[in-house]
Amino acid sequence: MIKFELSADNKLQLEHKLKADAKQLEELKQALRQQEQNFQAEKERMFLEFLEVFDALEYPIDYLKNNSNISPQFIKRLPKSLAAIQQKLSIALDRQQVTPIALEQTTPDFSCCQVVGREDRTDLADQTITKVVRQGFRYGDKILRPVEIITAKNGRNPST
């Protein structure tokens, strides 16, 4: 068995170091608990925003389900109601740094666009975007979902 002997000075230094390490460990544990609480609070806030969207959808769904004769006023208000719901969801996504991809050109940027269809168009250059089928979104630099587009298919020779 190996026996270690520490001088009083070394013993004091070791005790001081252990106390400092224990204090640092407690501070790290406290910081981790605080981060977990913040994360949980953020998650709850996000869920509440989604519940607002859920609630906003509930009325039109129930109305349509329970009324065989849909009133013209309901139909007239429906686009505005759906736009308000979309806006709520857009705000919730934006708070999570999920943003729509803005197309800045008339031709596809294949790093963020996916061509899902082509249409014959002699009035436009080949590969010109004619329609956005589905909005794309990014999270920071990452593409969550590409913009789904339809592009022109031009049988003409572009040099003529």
Image (tube, rainbow, N blue to C red):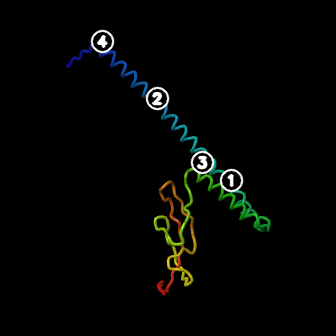
- Can I make out residue 120 in this image? yes
Image coords of residue 83 (percent x, y)? 68, 61
Q: Is the Cβ of the residue at disc 1 closer than 8 Å to that at disc 3? A: no
* Among the two numbered marks 4 and 2 on one chain, the one whose residue lies closer to the N terminus: 4
Mark 3 or mark 4, whichever is nearer to me? 4
Callout 4: helix, strand or loop?
helix
Residue placed under numbered mark 3 in the picture: 46
Residue placed under numbered mark 4 in the picture: 8
Q: Residues within 10 Å of mark 2 (few under 14, many from 20)?
A: few
Callout 3: helix, strand or loop?
helix
Residue toward you, 9 or 55: 9
Residue placed under numbered mark 1 in the picture: 55
Mark 4 or mark 1, whichever is nearer to me? 4
Identity of the amino acid at label 3?
A: Met
Write the residue at 46% across / 65% down: 111
* Among the two numbered marks 3 and 4 on one chain, the one whose residue lies closer to the N terminus: 4
Residue placed under numbered mark 2 in the picture: 27
